[in-house]
Image: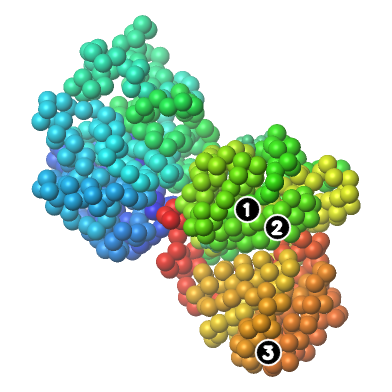
Amino acid sequence: MCGIFGYVNYLVEKTRGDISDTLIEGLQRLEYRGYDSAGIAIDGDKADETLIFKQIGKVGALKKEVESQNLDRTATFVNHAGIAHTRWATHGEPKTVNCHPHRSDINNEFVIVHNGIITNYRELKTLLKQKGYTFESDTDTECIAKLFKHIYDTNIKNGNEPDFNELMKQVLYEIDGSYGLLVKSSHYPNEVVATRKGSPLLVGVKTEKKLKVDFVDVEFPDELPNNEAPINGNTHQNGGLLPVAQGDSGLRHSQSRAFLSEDGIPQPAEFFLSSDPASVIQHTKKVLFLEDDDIAHIYDGELHIHRATREAGISATRSIQTLEMELAQIMKGPFSHFMQKEIYEQPESTFNTMRGRIDFDNHIVKLGGLQKWLTTIRRCRRIIMIACGTSYHSCLATRSIFEELTEIPVSVELASDFLDRRSPVFRDDTCIFVSQSGETADSMLALQYCLERDALTVGVVNSVGSSISRATHCGVHINAGPEIGVASTKAYTSQYIALVMIALSLSDDRVSKINRRHEIIDGLKQIPEQIKTVLTLESKIKDLCTSELAQQKSLLLLGRGYQFASALEGALKIKEISYMHSEGVLAGELKHGVLALVDDQLPIIAFATRDSLFPKVMSSIEQVTARSGRPIIIHNTDDKSINTDKALATLEVPLSVDCLQGLLNVIPLQLISYWLAVNRGIDVDFPRNLAKSVTVE
Ligand code: UD1
Ligand code: M6R
């Protein structure tokens, strides 16, 4: 939901202006995750001085606030650690005191930024208040900052000066919940400790020289002898809690191998910590994704990964990966909004979803991530698709073709409802989790629930390295590229295609399905070009949105069979972006109540593309026109059976196979929602009250 960003420079000279600009730009790239307020913490001019700046509103407002402070922007720092945050309010309304960074005390001894929720914060707050701490905010986060100081002071009183990562471990023992956390302290100048649990966090690494190895060793507590003296020159005096030991090679055991230099001289390095690769990519492509419960400790130009305990199955290294994402991919290009850009990317993104996976000439679908698992999935007793929002609609859109091709019963679940019902799940179930971000809390919790019950879990995810992608047994990356607009568009069409491809893979051993499979694969081949044709409707749609639809307060979408999902998805897009009430209605249900709403005023969009249910949809349209309703009809190109006289407007889309037609039909709705919103002066990429990645329950 919120975004966190940190920047540490070591032996790299930066001015205060450079540092605050880096932090603020990092936040700007995270803004799409949540944006009601923002803040940064950087060093002041005096030793041990930490400055905190906060502002409600967008990151631009924080930038102005920092600029208005008359700071010496030219002051230089060879070593420095700064942290930053964009907030989307969960505990406490958006006001300055609730912005992050939060602090331990008026001297800012410990400052922290946090994503997620601390579930036992009330108990901690009560306890810390009893110990004399005064709270400034309504947030759950502030108790972590106070806890750091309390535990630090207690250690000092007992004669220990804990290492920063050791202190983090002691704090983590006390807190429950989910978190991505960065901490900076005047007691540990130029250092940052970071950790995550159920919330994404990665570290970007930038060095002049190539890293010695492309991984970082995980340091477990039992590997560090307790009574060896700190080695020469090590400034990390930690009072014996976690001494740094000398190995046979003369190297520090805890020295990070990746950062070793030939001559032992410290190397200049920069580190970028973030909840999202999108804010790191402009600085470096080398990133390390933290695992849950990892503690990253950055100091003296090195990155160390610690864990409090050694659990079975935990890898002893974390790899430093090279991100493929290009900066250009995350910029708007010639488009006014990310949403518009992403709508226009669909010919390419749908193609990328299929690239290298479908051999169109031989009608073969091969999903690298599922090959080994196909036999197990084919044997399962049922398939449960679980998702939220738009991702849920892509499941609804493909359920029927899944059932038809696989002959396995399929149910589709909203993650939150699935969990509320504690729905029974068994070890012979296959649970498919569909998520653009791969970080949606409801979906992630449902995934954990299914894992605990030993079901096979399959992810259909856009973000590589996301929590769902990593926690599922297997899956398919939809490869749509980064989606920044809060309204999901290209992810929907790519999820849809990925799910169809899964159904095709699962049925490739069924002779009885050969013709149907060939028809669908041929249909998929045409989709990218057909999307290009649908996109040419934009100017007609723009006119419709500035004329007939401009002043409307409500809108109905009618669909049936495959097009019910298109109606629901269209209605969601319109609601979330234009704030206009809209409702997707199953055309067959019209006469059971909804017809009462129909008059000559209420705009109705009807999907009347050709499939087996076409005659029934036409009869629903007649029910509407008989009551003076004037529908906007989406139909196939040159379909002469459509009575255009009684329609308010018609929108023609190319014909596809029945189960793929929704890929084309949804696009006019994406454009309608976009233009309704633009005409109403709404900031399309940042609709009110919503965030791109919903990491709270
Ligand atoms: C993979 C590579 C791709 C390369 C291709 C060539 C990755 C991310 N993909 O693509 O760069 O061009 O091989 O052979 O390295 N997975 C999950 N859960 C999910 C999604 C995926 O567990 O939600 C797993 C898959 O089971 C698989 C791995 O992640 O083991 C990669 O999945 P995917 O990117 O879909 O595989 P390929 O298309 O084979
Ligand atoms: O990242 P996910 O696909 O898991 O997100 C699920 C929903 O939050 C998301 O689809 C939401 O409904 C979109 N904003 C809709 O446009």
Q: Residues within 10 Å of mark 3 (few under 14, many from 20)?
A: many
- The secondary element bearing badge 1 is classed as strand
Q: Quadrant of the C terminus?
A: bottom left
Q: Nearer the viewer, residue 422 or 613?
A: 422
The answer to which quarter of the image holds residue 394 is bottom right
Q: CA distance from mark 3 to mark 2?
A: 31 Å
Q: Specify which label sits upstream in the sequence, 3 or 2.
A: 2
Q: Is residue 221 above or below residue 4?
A: above
> Which element type, helix, strand or loop, lies under badge 2?
helix
Q: CA distance from mark 2 to mark 1?
A: 8 Å
Q: Residue at x 69, y 93 (%)?
A: 628
Write the residue at 38% across / 46% down. Answer: 178
Residue contact between numbered discs 2 and 1, judged by CB atoms under 8 Å: yes
Relative to 630, residue 535 above or below: above
- Label 2 is placed on what type of residue? Arg
Q: Taking the image as drawn, is residue 347 in sight?
A: no
Judge by depth and name the residue closer to the eye, 277 or 568.
Answer: 568
Left or right of 560? Residue 60 is: left
Looking at the rendered image, the disc whose residue lies closer to the viewer, 1 or 3, is 1
Mark linked to residue 385: 1
Q: Secondary structure at mark 3?
A: loop
Rendering coords of residue 152 (x, y %): 18, 35
In the rendered image, the quadrant that contains the N terminus is: bottom left
Residue located at (46% from left, 67% from top): 687
Q: Nearer the viewer, mark 3 or mark 2?
A: 2
Residue 675 horizontal side relative to residue 269, left or right: right
Location of mark 3 (residue): 629
Q: Is residue 419 left or right of residue 659?
A: left
Mark 2, residue position:
399
The answer to whether one can see residue 166 in this image is yes
Going from N to C along the chain, the mark reached first, 1 or 3, is 1
Residue type, numbered disc 3: Gly
